Image (cartoon, rainbow, N blue to C red):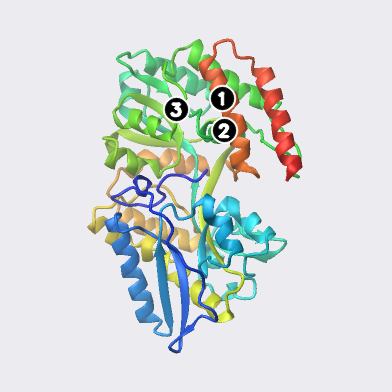
């Protein structure tokens, strides 16, 4: 799954759903002696702050590079799964186009991505980016894309409710046993307070099941991607823990089949103790759901083994000319990949426009570039960065794992197992996992 509105903004883009308006590349990419590139994922006009930032950055790029003409197409979502493959196959994709991490292998498999390997040395920032994120766009030793943002799952929690329940808000739970115990104490506050909420519909239950399974050291599919690996003690522990919090402890509330908006509404209203999410949920909780930054914190994924990561980047159309590839790489450096500058990194500008600065992610860089980025972020922070330090520290000890192959199909299957344990007191965990495992094996066998 993609995370929600991964951008430090005043306006969460998740409230908009404008259709893609993109046209394809422009032949040889020359226009009036200039190299012309089309790019996508420009924020829609309704997201006024982001739109203005994006337009400002394109204008400054073109001023610095008068031989390059950038034509941006706005869209939200930046990638529509219903049209993505058709645009690729029809040659209608932009020269530089947005992808989720989980798309990289697929785009390469269908032979629709330009090989960037000969040109990457011209991308100034490339060596400063996290190798783990770079590797997502590397297939058989060749580079086909550039990461732009990354997120990792953690535990968002309400500090005020922790205090009311007699828990230390500076010591959030580190294990699932502690999550269960803390959720029970929070739920005992009464008044409709829910200790822990989880998703169980619209494929989001399967997404969170995967994250929780990763956290306990398990996996959804085998390393070769051919067999399900969920009929295991780790997977049983995930479902039994959810079942027991729901039915034994009564710490998850009576309303189930929740999706992300339900959990956000509960957290924003001060009625929820904890739920799994990425840091980009925090601005949504404040700007849209009534929450307060001082009450909201995030901890690393409980379990201590791993966390699910996601994010996005840009790939290049297979028909791009060398000049278009070089222009596109320059544009990525300018827009997204220079600490302290551009659409994602100009923290001083974001602070001036009252956009949140100081959230713990995205964290793309390593070494001196990361130190520079963190220094500038801290200097311009307008949110309580101390509430996120536990998350930052704890993430350094976790294995980072991307979503499984055929993620949405697998999540649809796993939704059924999660929803069953949360809506049926007598749900048979062993049987649910066996049935889900068989269905996943069939999906994987079809390729």
Relative to 408, residue 248 above or below: above
Q: Name the spot of residue 90 as percent of width and height, x first.
A: 58, 65
Picture quadrant where residue 141 is located: bottom right
Q: Secondary structure at mark 2?
A: helix
Q: Which residue is mark 1?
A: 418
Q: Which residue is mark 3?
A: 258
Using the numbered discs, state the Cα–Cα distance from disc 2 to disc 1 in whole angstroms.
Answer: 7 Å
Badge 2 vs badge 1, beta-carbon distance below 8 Å:
yes
Relative to 187, residue 207 above or below: below
Using the numbered discs, state the Cα–Cα distance from disc 1 to disc 3 in whole angstroms.
Answer: 11 Å
Q: Tag 3 or tag 1, which sits nearer the N-term?
A: 3
Left or right position of 262 against 224: left
Q: Name the spot of residue 201 as percent of width and height, x first.
A: 50, 30
Q: Which residue is mark 2?
A: 206
Regarding residue 8, the answer to whether it shows in the image is yes
Q: Tag 2 or tag 3, which sits nearer the N-term?
A: 2
């Amino acid at each position: 799954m993609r995370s929600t509105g991964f951008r430090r903004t005043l306006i969460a883009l998740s409230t908009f759903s404008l259709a893609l308006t993109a046209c394809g590349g422009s032949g040889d990419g020359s226009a009036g002696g200039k190299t012309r590139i089309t790019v996508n994922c420009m924020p829609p006009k309704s997201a006024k702050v982001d739109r203005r930032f994006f337009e400002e950055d394109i204008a400054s790029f073109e001023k610095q590079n008068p031989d390059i003409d950038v034509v941006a197409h706005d869209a939200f979502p930046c990638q529509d799964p219903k049209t993505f493959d058709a645009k690729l196959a029809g040659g209608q994709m932009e020269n530089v186009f947005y992808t989720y991490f989980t798309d990289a292998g697929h785009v390469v498999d269908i032979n629709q991505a330009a090989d960037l390997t000969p040109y990457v040395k011209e991308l100034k920032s490339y060596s400063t980016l996290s190798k783990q994120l770079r590797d997502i766009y590397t297939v058989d030793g060749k580079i086909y894309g550039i990461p732009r943002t990354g997120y990792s799952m953690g535990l968002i929690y309400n500090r005020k409710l922790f205090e009311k329940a007699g828990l230390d808000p500076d010591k959030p739970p580190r294990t699932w046993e502690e999550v269960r115990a803390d959720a029970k104490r929070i739920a005992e506050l009464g008044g409709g307070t829910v200790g822990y909420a989880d998703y169980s519909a619209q494929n989001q239950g399967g997404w969170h099941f995967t994250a929780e399974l990763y956290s306990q050291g398990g996996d959804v599919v085998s390393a070769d991607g051919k067999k399900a690996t969920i009929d295991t003690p780790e997977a049983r522990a995930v479902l039994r823990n959810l079942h027991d919090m729901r039915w034994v402890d009564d710490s998850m509330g009576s309303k189930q089949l929740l999706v992300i908006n339900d959990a956000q509404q509960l957290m924003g209203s001060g009625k929820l103790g904890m739920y799994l999410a990425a840091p980009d949920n925090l601005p949504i909780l404040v700007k849209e759901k009534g929450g307060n930054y001082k009450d909201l914190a995030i901890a690393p994924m409980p379990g201590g083994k791993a966390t699910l990561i996601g994010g996005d980047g840009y790939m290049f159309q297979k028909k791009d000319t060398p000049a278009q590839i070089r222009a596109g790489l320059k544009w990525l450096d300018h827009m997204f990949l220079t600490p302290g500058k551009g659409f994602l990194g100009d923290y001083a500008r974001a602070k001036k426009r009252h956009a949140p600065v100081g959230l713990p992610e995205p964290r793309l860089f390593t070494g001196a570039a990361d130190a520079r980025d963190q220094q500038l972020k801290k200097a311009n922070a307008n949110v309580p960065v101390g509430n996120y330090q536990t998350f930052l520290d704890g993430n350094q000890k976790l294995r980072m794992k991307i979503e499984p192959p055929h993620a949405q199909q697998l999540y649809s299957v796993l939704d059924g197992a999660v929803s069953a344990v949360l809506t049926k007191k007598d749900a048979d965990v062993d049987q649910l996992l066996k049935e889900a495992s068989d269905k996943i094996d069939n999906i994987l066998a079809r390729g």
